[in-house]
Image: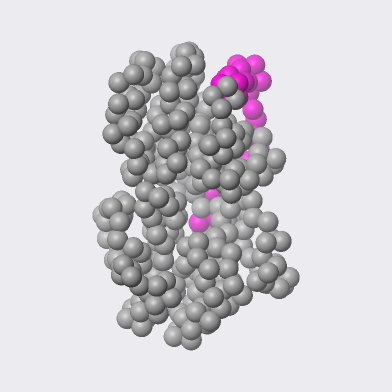
């Protein structure tokens, strides 16, 4: 029987594209079993998924989150609602949605409503389950799905594993990617630093679809030497990278999956804490912390060390993420 599945998320140059991409990856796997609807706020970032042929259902400007969900439930009568929002959902709301006939799945959100959700998924490696005790019993915490087995890797990234790497470039390739929107302007801060380091490295600077500082990056590009190229974000650029400099988020898990040595910079203190947990357990991650606390010399030293490791003692990472998290999550949903 065909099902109606609603994904509730937001994306913008401020909140980034991580929730959008995660929902899109899941939706692609579910489209054969029913009708997919993206419930979101109007924003230019929605253009990224317009050609996917999924339907949109928009939140009105002054509408509360609670009223929006009740309205969509009454009008669309979905079989499944997937909430991928950092929002303090209350138990009463989740129960009301379930009483109207919807299965409720909450992704990556700590809130009171967890105790009434049908499934709880944290597709991250660094979840501290002690944080769930306020809302969940010990028995329910055991049923929360999280860890490497539930990390979502996009098809575009999974396919890269099958592509051969070009081993014949004369200089090391460092790929820099700071997310779809880069709300804190990480790229604007570190790009002049990398330029001034005068390293024998080819830098590929990947600019996201909703990058906030397009005019500024155009001006910076004029001051870069020939070993820098600025290009639109493309996953294919990653496969030949010897080192990646990226911001914490979806990208960091993708680099672990691809087993590429990675220097991680965070847009927020919360992300910096999560990155430190990854660094403790996974030897290919080097955490440089919150961008506002980062200094040029530290980036230089870490990048130079990583380049030396490539020459003398290449990192041999363990297989940490198998890439099948999306299949496990789809099975939970259906």
Classify residue 272 as left or right of residue 26: right
Identified at 51% across, 32% down, the residue is 245
Q: Is residue 328 visible?
A: no
- Asked whether residue 4 is drawn in magenta, I would say no
Residue 167 percent across, percent down from the top left = 48, 21
Q: Foreground: 312 or 33?
A: 312
Identified at 64% across, 51% down, the residue is 126
Q: Residue furthest right?
A: 138
Identified at 56% across, 56% down, the residue is 123
Identified at 34% across, 19% down, the residue is 223
Q: Residue furthest bottom?
A: 99
- Asked whether residue 323 is drawn in magenta, I would say yes
Residue 56 percent across, percent down from the top left = 30, 66
Q: Foreground: 15 or 226?
A: 15
Image quadrant where residue 65 sits: bottom left
Q: Is residue 314 above or below residue 120?
A: above
Residue 241 percent across, percent down from the top left = 48, 28
Q: Foreground: 85 or 146?
A: 85
- The range drawn in magenta is 299-326
């Amino acid at each position: 029987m065909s099902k109606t599945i609603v994904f509730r998320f937001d994306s913008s140059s401020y909140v980034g594209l991580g929730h959008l991409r995660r929902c899109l990856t899941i939706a692609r796997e579910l489209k054969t079993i029913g009708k997919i609807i993206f419930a979101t706020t109007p924003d230019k970032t929605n253009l990224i998924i317009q050609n996917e042929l999924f339907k949109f259902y928009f939140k009105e400007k002054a509408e509360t989150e609670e009223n929006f969900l009740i309205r969509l439930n009454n009008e669309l009568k979905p079989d499944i609602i997937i909430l991928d929002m950092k929002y303090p959902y209350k138990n009463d709301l989740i129960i009301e949605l379930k009483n109207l006939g919807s299965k409720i799945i909450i992704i990556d959100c700590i809130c009171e409503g967890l105790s009434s959700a049908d499934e709880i998924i944290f597709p991250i490696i660094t979840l501290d389950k002690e944080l769930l005790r306020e809302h969940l019993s010990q028995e329910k915490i055991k049923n929360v799905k999280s860890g490497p087995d539930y990390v979502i890797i996009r098809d575009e990234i999974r396919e890269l594993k099958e592509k051969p790497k070009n081993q014949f470039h004369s200089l090391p390739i460092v790929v820099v990617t700071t997310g779809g929107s880069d709300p804190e302007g990480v790229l604007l801060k570190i790009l002049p630093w990398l330029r001034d380091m005068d390293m024998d490295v080819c830098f590929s600077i990947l600019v996201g679809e909703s990058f906030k500082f397009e005019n500024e990056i155009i001006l910076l590009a004029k001051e870069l030497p020939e070993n820098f190229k600025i290009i639109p974000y493309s996953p294919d650029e990653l496969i030949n990278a010897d080192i990646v400099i990226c911001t914490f988020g979806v990208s960091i898990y993708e680099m672990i999956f691809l087993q590429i040595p990675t220097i991680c910079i965070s847009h927020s203190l919360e992300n910096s804490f999560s990155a430190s947990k990854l660094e403790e357990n996974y030897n290919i991650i080097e955490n440089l912390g919150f961008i506002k606390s980062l200094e040029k010399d530290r980036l230089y030293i870490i990048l130079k060390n990583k380049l030396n490791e490539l020459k003398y003692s290449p990192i041999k990472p363990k297989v940490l993420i198998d890439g099948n998290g999306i299949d496990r999550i789809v099975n939970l949903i259906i």
